[in-house]
Each structure stands twice: as structure tokens, then as C-alpha cells.
Amino acid sequence: MSFWGYPRPGGSVGTRNYVAIVPTVVCATATARQVSDNVKGSVPFLHQQGCALTPSDLEMANRTLTNLALNPNIAAVVLISLGCDPIDIDGIAEKIAAAGKPVEKFVIQDVGGTIATTEQATRVARQMVSDASRISREQFDESKLMFGAECGGSDTTSGLGANPAIGAAFDILVKKGGRAVFSETTEFIGAEHLLARRAVTPEVGEQITNLVRRYEERFLEKGVDMRGTNPTKGNIQGGLTTIEEKSLGAISKGGTEPIQEIYEYGERPTKGGLTIVDGPGFDAPSLTAMAAAGATVMFFSTGRGTPLGSPFVPVIKVTANGVSYEKMKDNIDFYVNLADKEHIGDIGADLYAEAIEVASGRQTKAEILGQDRDNGLFLVGPLA
């Protein structure tokens, strides 16, 4: 099975062909939105960060914005900053250009305000979209794909059906030579030892347990016990009772293949196969982490339902809750009907086929409804 994607410099392949409008700071977000509104075929990354950052958060924000812009689904990039924000717009632009991707940057304070910036950036974005439209889809092997997986609004059906189906789709891609990534460190708590057993080396296994320990300690220093905040109110209403129960369900979306590598938020994996990125348990910044990692198609399991997508990567919504599916058919793409197939692997194969269609251009419901514009950056704060 192959898919139809967009060739990129360096050999990567995109499933979409966007021009990205990326503000470096919240003060430039409205301008980025205006530019994107003017140019069909461009997509903004709208976030509320970028100012008054600690050194560690500044480093994380710089690498995340850089690697987000390098996602294969992006053909070209327009960067917009205010001018007094600490984000290194020049460094980000240089790294994007070094990767062979067209990039232009605009500094609102230097250009002379938002009207002038919007006008100039609109003209550049229009030309970038015109140039990108000349790139045609070509047929590629599935090994060029990278899946990401998220879960949110979890209930009892998430761990029983939706997440295992995603895990089965992950296994298929990894066995075919492709790559897959999952995250949500807080939702490893109580099940981290099971992930560690799947690590390719003892050292990687130790990284997994240390990752969870670091996350917990970070919050304990603030007097917050993560084991007391999960499951959330919505999870409890959905039938989950303990953090271990939630975590056992959450990690099943990572499939069964060996875990090759652990890396920090905003970084890109250096190895193939299945990897983990350290990310938060809340959905928008977690999706950003996987997009920055290079995911070109993402799954999002939900028991209770959610409309959230991601700006540059198609997100396939998956549920095993029949009630939620009927209520939110406008938002959910794939129903895991556990009574329909004898084995979860068969459902995973169907989900994998759905992902291939999406990779080849079929739009997800989040894309069609425009639920894929607002997202976020994760910040750790002074404890880092």
C-alpha cells in the first residue's frame, strides 16, 4: 500500500502542501491571522506565548517553532515577530532556509506597524502559495509516513477500543519501515514500567522512568501531586477510576513495537521506528510537539468527543464510544466498533487504511470545519 504525497528537500514527504504563517510571539498573532485570512492555501500557527520566557523555555520555544516550520507538510514559511520579543527569528529563518525551504521574515516594529506588515507579508505569502501549487503529489512508499497519537476526553472505551486500534495502526506502519511518535508524559504515570520494558535498551528504559519522575517532581515542588489531579472530572464522568487505569489505556495507543528513543519537547527524533516525546497531558501543546517531531498524520482518540485539530497536520478523530460517535459525527472520523471485528488488529488495519487515504489528500472533519487553526506551545516555567 502506498500513498500520494508532496516531495520535500532532503527526501521527506508531506501529506499536505501548506504555506505556514508563524508568529513568534502573541503580539504578532493577530497580524499572522490577518495575513492567512488574505491568502487561501496558507495556515497560521496561533499561540499565546513568546514573551518574557525563562532561558530554558526560550530555548524550547525556539526549537519548537523551528522544527514545526520544518514539518514536511509545510512548503514555505512566513515568520512574523513584533521585534522586542526574545524569540530568535533570524536563527529560526536561517535553519529553515538551510533545510531548503523558502522562508521570509517580517518584524512589525521595523516594517512600520501591522497594516504595512500585513500588506507586505500577504504579497509574499501569495507568491509562496502560487509556487507551492506547482508541486504535484507523487506516489511514495508508506515508510515515508510518520504517525502521531493523542488522546483526550478519555473514558473507559478509550483504553478498551480507540487507543488499542491506534496502537495496531502504529504497529503496521513501524513494521513497514515508517515512524511513529506518542507523548503525554503525565499519562504514563503508573504504567511507565510497562513502557520501560519495551525500550530498545536498558538506558532508554531508564530514560522513560526518569521522564515520569522528573515530571512528578516538577509539580511536587509546587505542592501539586499529579496523582491527585488525574483522572480529570471528565474522565471520572466517563467511568475511569484511577490514574493507573487511565495510564494503562493511554499507553496502548503506542502499540507494541520497541521504543527506540526519548526526546525533549520540540525536538525531532534522530532514529526510525517508535519514539516518545516528553509532552504535557493537555491536547493542543501535545499535538504541537508531535507536529514539531515531524508527524505528517495524527490520530486523536476521544471517548467523550472533541473538535480540536492541528494547524499543519491532519488529525483523525477516533472513538470507541457509540454514544459519543452519534452525538459528534460532525467531528469524529472513525468509529471503533468492537462488535464488528473479532480482533483489534483488524480494526487497526481499517484505521491504517483510513490514514493512508488522509495522507493522500482526503480531508479530516477538523480540516473541513476549520477546527485546526488554534494551537499552543508548552512552557515549563521557572522550575525547569
Image (cartoon, grey):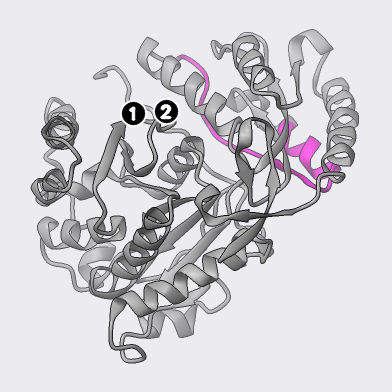
Q: Say above or below: 91 vs 245.
A: above
Q: CA distance from mark 2 to mark 1?
A: 6 Å
Give the residue at x 79% y 47%.
41
Q: Are marks 2 and 1 in contact (CB under 8 Å)?
A: yes
Find disc 2 in the rendering and name its residue.
267
Counting labels gives 2
Asked if residue 69 lies in the magenta stretch, the reply is: no
Identify residue for label 1. 264
Q: Which quarter of the rendering shows the N terminus?
A: bottom right
Label 1: which secondary element: loop
* Residue drawn at point x = 33 percent, y = 28 percent: 264
Left or right: 89, with 124 as reference point: left
Q: Amino acid at mark 2?
A: Glu
Q: Looking at the picture, tell me which residue is in the foreground, 329 or 212.
A: 212
Magenta residues, as a range? 32-52
Q: Amino acid at mark 1?
A: Glu
Identified at 91% across, 30% down, the residue is 123
* Crowding at mark 1 (Cα within 10 Å: few <14, some 14-19, many 20+): some
Q: Is residue 300 above or below residue 23?
A: below
> Where is residue 358 drawn, in percent x and y?
60, 64
At 88% from the left and 36% from the top, the residue drawn is 126
Compared across the picture, whether 202 is left or right of 312 comes to: left
Camera-side residue of 201 and 213: 201
Residue situated furthest bottom in the rendering: 339
Depth check, front residue: 112 or 204: 204
Q: Residues within 10 Å of mark 2 (few under 14, many from 20)?
A: many
**Callout 2 secondary element:** loop
Q: Is residue 146 left or right of residue 358?
A: left
